[in-house]
Each structure stands twice: as C-alpha cells, then as structure tokens.
Image: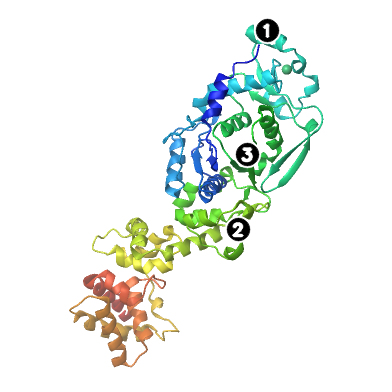
Amino acid sequence: MAMDMTYFDAMEAKIPHGKIRTRFAPSPTGYMHVGNLRTALYTWLIARNGGGTFILRIEDTDQGRLVEGATDVIYRTMAECGLNHDEGPDVGGPVAPYIQSERRDTYGKYARLLVEKGFAYYCFCEKTESEEDAGDFNRAADPCRSLTPEEAQARVDAGEPYVIRQRIPESGTTTFHDAIFGDITVENATLDDQVLLKRDGLPTYNFANVIDDHLMGITHVVRGSEYLSSAPKYDLLYQSFGWEVPTYVHCSPVMRDQHNKMSKRHGDPSYEDLKAQGYLTEAILNYVALLGWSPRGDQAEREVFSLNELAEVFDIGGISKSPAIFDIEKLTHFNALYLRAMTPEAFHAVAEPCIRQAVKNPALDTRAIAALLQARCEKLTEIPEKVAFFEALPAYERDLFTNKKSKTNDEVSRRMLESVIPAMEELTDWTQEAIHDCLIDLAAKLEVKNATLMWPVRIAAAGQAVTPGGAVEICQILGREECLWRLGIGLEMLKA
Ligand SMILES: [Zn+2]
C-alpha cells in the first residue's frame, strides 16, 4: 500500500521559493561565543546582501544542554547587534514553528518516509553511545539492516524500542560541494549508518538540521568546518528525499592561537564578556566580520565597515579557508577607531555610566569630562581609572612638580603657583577661554614658557602626571573653589 503523502505535500507547499533564505540556528547555551556570533553575522549578511530573508531558529532538542534564560541571551544579542530576523519564534512566519522542540512530531514522519523509501531502517539493537561515537559500529553486521519491511514493522508494532538509521550505500562514493572548500568526494564505505531518530522519538542534530533547512526553504547553510565530515551524509539524505541541496558554506574555526580553537571553557571571551570589557558592539561586529572574511576588489584595503556597509560588500567568495586567529589587540584598535569616530553626544552617552562609576559629584560635568576622554581611550572600561582624580585629589609626591621638558623643579613650580593662585582668584568668568587667557598672559608676564607655567598647575589640580586633558580643561571642570583649593595644597607642599 502506498504511503499517504498528504502531510508531506502540505509541508512542501508551504516552502517559500525564489529568494535567498538563510538561518541562524543557535542552541540556547546562555552565551554567544565569538564563532557563533560570526556565523550569525555571515548568515545575516548573505541574506541582506542578496535581498533575501533571514530566519532565527532555536535548536533546543538537545535537552541536556538547556540553560534557563538562554534564549533571551540570543534575542538580546541579535537585537543589540542589529541582526534583525524576518522570521523566528517571536515574529512567526510562513514555516512556523521556529523552535525545534515544537517541531518534534515532524521528524518522525520524515524518518518513517525514508524507511518507506528504503533509505533508512528500524534498528532494534541496544548500542551504547560510545559504540556509536567510536565508529565501532560495523553496519554490515547489523542484523536490522537486512530485515524485511514486514519483519521490522511487526517488531515496531509489538512495541519493541528502536532507532531509525540512515541506510548508507555500501559502495560507491558521494561528492558534495562546498562554497569555500569546493568539491569533496568520500567513499561511502567510510560513512556510518547514522541514527536519524533516537529511541525517545527525538531527531539527532544532523537529521533535524536537514529536515528543518529543507522545510524552511533555506538556500545557504553557514556552519563550522568541523561539520565538513558529516556533509556527505547530508547530501545523501537530500538525495534520498529527492530534495535540492542548499549551498553549503563551511567556515574555518576562530582560533585563540595557532593550535587551539577559541573556547568559553578555556576562558576565551564571549560576546557578553567583550561588552563587559568595554568594547562597543559596532567594533566587535566589524572585527568579527574580518575574522575569516576579507573584502575584495576596490574595497580590499578597507577595514572599517558599518553593518549596512558590510551588507553591501559581503560576498561568500571573500571567506577564507584558513582558520582566523582572534587578536584582542586588533579588536582594541577597532574599538578606539569607533570611539573616536562617534559624535560627542554619542560618545557621552556610552561614556557617562563609566565616568559616573568614579565621579559621583553631580557638580562635575560629565560632558566636559567625556570630551577629554574621547580621543584618549581605547576601551570604555579604562574610563573610571582615568577620571577618578576629578572626584578626589589623589595623594601624590612632590617630585611630580619636577619635569625636565617643561623646565620645572620645586622652586620654579612654587613661584608659578604663587602667581597663578591670585591671578585665578581674580577671574570673573570660570570658562576654559578665561582660564586659558589668564594663564597665557601670566606666562608672558613672568617671561617663562607656557609649559613651565602649565605643568605645576596641572600637577596640583590633578595630583597625577598623566591626565586626560591639560591644565586649562582640568581646572575648568573642577570648578573655581575646588581648583583653587587644590592649587593651594600644591603650593603648601612646595613650601614645606
Ligand atoms: Zn540493529
């Protein structure tokens, strides 16, 4: 009796055609590691570059790995990064549901369809996981492979537990094509009859992927090159169903060094970690895009791309076969470029919380402080340490007043401060311009270089040798009273 195909025909009819469709299909692990973010980015870019559809699918059938709140991390990261999806669990779409656990009834039907077609079989053997993984499974010896359909069905009907295995041809070769690695041919004899449907009725990762990708009309599959070895089995599955094989784009791993992949377990940062370390999302995305992809043609020398600019120039042909090494120094370089390119308002918005970690006094103007920092910081997390002196004068040593280049020593610094304090007390306006003019005029009157006067003022005002901004800006931000008090403290120290 022929199988009723109504269900399969209905599923087939739902599949959208004619446009590029890509998907990002993370497992909810509770964080987004850098390699995962890159996969999300590349799949998004392929869709956007081709005017296609980007789909978010949650692969949560591996129940043992579920972490509470983990899907929220995925949604939050995608939204923060601007990797908006057109279809997904939260927004729906024509091939819903987009959560694998809600599709569980589908996989068994397709596995049984393959049994019907002769490309899969019921296996009743008790095998431990290690027997499967170790490649010890000698399929020629599996008695279930040669059961007649009637024999197998009778045992299923009798309630005997089973898995469904893919029936790999015993001889011949399978060739699959990868957009990056080209044609790869393997001997079928080297492939195992992998499990498609487990005893609990849930699909294996490989099987669920093929079914979902087909039923969602996915045209381009981006994934890690560690899956290259299972790709021929995918090809055979597509052939067995008579489905068109999508374009495979296998990407080489992101490495922490020459020999080791990046891994959260070894302390390598996830996206969330990088954010917490003071990196901007835009800089992270730009850098991650270049981990294994480079622009070509007239853009070949270019490094800085916004997300939309990437969407315009991204092409699969620019993806490298070689593994990319994650270099935090290079990311820091990108971050500094992005911080400097922001408008003062935008920089203030991201810097303010970091400034306020150290500077609690509401009278101190965070906008003025941010203006000093913008050209002088590479990461937002450097900010509190750089600006803490505004909040409280640090304890410092008198030898800071001695500086060869500025031609200052204790004696010179004392004379400068003795003149500066009364001159600044006279100021009616406490603006940068007024302070600047006052100090410059005074230097001329005293017949010293500007630096000779500015050095002791800055040391006394800040209490440290290295500061964002010069004497004028620091004095202005501190305000008249605090500034004059600090200059007085410096003078007392020099007199002692
Ligand atoms: Zn068996």
Task: In the rendered view, tell whether residue 97 sits above or below residue 473.
Answer: above
**Residue at 75% from the left image edge and 31% from the top image edge:** 191
* Ligand 1 contact, mark 1 (Cβ < 8 Å): no
- Residue under circle 2? 294
- Which amino acid, mark 3? Pro
- Which amino acid, mark 2? Ser
Q: Quadrant of residue 69?
A: top left
Q: Mark 2 near mark 1, Cβ–Cβ under 8 Å?
A: no
Report the disc number at residue 194. Answer: none
Q: Quadrant of residue 2?
A: top right
Question: How far across and down, in percent of the image, does residue 424 sit?
Answer: 23, 80
Question: Quick one: label 2 or label 1, which is nearer the N terminus?
Answer: 1
Question: How far across and down, in percent of the image, does residue 460 sit?
Answer: 33, 75
Question: Quick one: label 3 or label 1, which is nearer the N terminus?
Answer: 1
Residue 411 visible (yes or no): no
Question: How far across and down, in percent of the image, does residue 308 sit?
Answer: 47, 55
- Residue under circle 1? 154
Quadrant the N terminus occupies: top right
Alpha carbon separation for disc pair 3 and 1: 37 Å
Which is more toward the observer, 392 or 437?
A: 437
Q: Secondary structure at mark 2?
A: loop
Q: Image quadrant of ligand 1? A: top right
Task: In the rendered view, tell whether residue 44 sits above or below residue 424.
Answer: above
Within 10 Å of the Cα at label 1, are there few (<14), some (14-19), or many (20+) other Cα atoms?
A: few
Question: Quick one: label 3 or label 2, which is nearer the N terminus?
Answer: 3
- Residue under circle 3? 246
